[in-house]
Amino acid sequence: MDRYVVIGNPIAHSQSPFIHQAFAEQTGQVLSYERLLLPLDNFAGGLADFVQQGGFGCNVTVPFKTDALAVADVLSERAMLAEAVNTLKVQEDGRLFADNTDGAGLVMDLKRLGVPLAGQRILLLGAGGAARGVMGPLLAEQPAALIVTNRTHARAEELAKRFAGLGPVSHQPLEGLHGAFDLIINSTSASLQGERLSLPASLCHSNTRVYDMMYGKEDTPFMCWAAEQGVTHRYDGLGMLVGQAAESFYLWRGVRPEMEPVMQALRARLE
Ligand code: ATR
C-alpha cells in the first residue's frame, strides 16, 4: 500500500492520520497514513529510512519544518517564501519535492467561510513561522493592505520587508496599533499558553471578521476578545488544518477531497 506519514516531535496528538484516512475513504484512494515520531536530532536520518522503505510522502510538523526545507531536492515557490516545509513528496525520479500548504489551507478555509480577501484591510497578529507561511498566499488574493504586528516589533518589520515585493505589506507596533480592519488573523501562539493579547477595541468595525489559526474544544482567548468587541464572524483554525491537509493530499494523489464532511467529523472528535 502507498505509505504516508506525519513526522513531528511530539506527534501523538496529531489529527492528520484521521483527516487523511477520511480523505482516502471519500475519494477511493488506497493508502496508509500514520504518525512517525522522530528524535529531535535526527530528522534527516529518520526521513531517509522512511523513503528507503518505500514511503511515498509525508507531512512535517513542529519542530521539523526547517529541517524539511534543508533536505529537499526541489522546492515549491511557496515553500521558498515561507522558509518552511510541511509536505514532502517522493517524485518518480526519486528526488524529494518540498511544498508548504499552510497558507493555501488558510486561504481555502477563508473562501469556504465566505470571507472576502480582495480589496480588504487585513491585520496579521504575530510574525513567527506561522505568519511567514501565510503571507504569500494572502497577498496573492490582492488585499488592499496587509499589516503585520508583533510583540517583538523587529520581527514584524523584518517580515514586512521580506514580502514587500509581493503586495501592499506594512507593519505597526503592537502598542499603538491603529485603524480598523476587515479581517484580523491571529497567528501568535499566545492562545496556546492561554494568554490574551492586549488589543484596542478600535480595530473592529461593524463587519470585521476574525480568524484564529489555533483551534480547540472551546473558543480561543482571541475569539473571546472579538466576541466582547461585538464581532459576530469569528472562526478558529480547524478549517485551516483540514485545508492544508487537502492541499497536501492533492499534491500526492491528484484528487481534491471535500473538506466539509471531514470538518464535521473532526469537530465532533474534539467535543
Ligand atoms: P510559530 O511557528 O507558531 O509562528 P514562533 O515562530 O515561535 O512560532 O512564533 C510565535 C509567535 O507568537 C510570535 O509572533 C510571538 O511573538 P514574539 O515574536 O514576540 O515572540 C507570538 N507570541 C507568543 N506568545 C505570545 C504572547 N503571550 N503574547 C504575544 N505574542 C506572543
Image: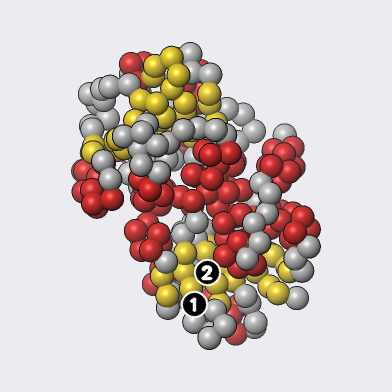
Q: Residue at x 72, y 34 (%)?
A: 271
Q: Is residue 8 visible?
A: no
- Residue 208, given in percent of the width and then of the height, sits at 43, 22
Left or right, 59 with reference to 200: right
| Quadrant where the N terminus is found in the figure | bottom right
Asked which colour scheme the image uses, the reply is: secondary structure
Quickly name the residue at label 1: 96
Left or right, 198 with reference to 89: left
Q: Is residue 23 visible?
A: yes
Three-letter amino acid code at the position of disc 1: Leu
Above or below, 53 against 107 in this view is below
Secondary structure type for disc 1:
strand
Quickly name the residue at label 2: 88
Three-letter amino acid code at the position of disc 2: Leu
Q: CA distance from mark 1 to mark 2?
A: 6 Å
Between 109 and 141, the one lying in front of the other is: 141
Above or below, 168 against 103 in this view is above
Q: Residue at x 37, y 31 (%)?
A: 120
Above or below, 179 against 68 in this view is above
How many residues crowd mark 1 within 10 Å: few (<14), some (14–19), many (20+)?
many
How many residues crowd mark 2 within 10 Å: few (<14), some (14–19), many (20+)?
many
- Where on the picture, by quarter, is residue 81? bottom left
- Residue 123, given in percent of the width and then of the height, sits at 35, 32
- Residue 217, given in percent of the width and then of the height, sits at 64, 33
Q: Are marks 1 and 2 in contact (CB under 8 Å)?
A: yes
Between 187 and 233, the one lying in front of the other is: 233
Q: Residue at x 42, y 40 (%)?
A: 187
Between 13 and 24, the one lying in front of the other is: 24
Q: Residue at x 36, y 42 (%)?
A: 142
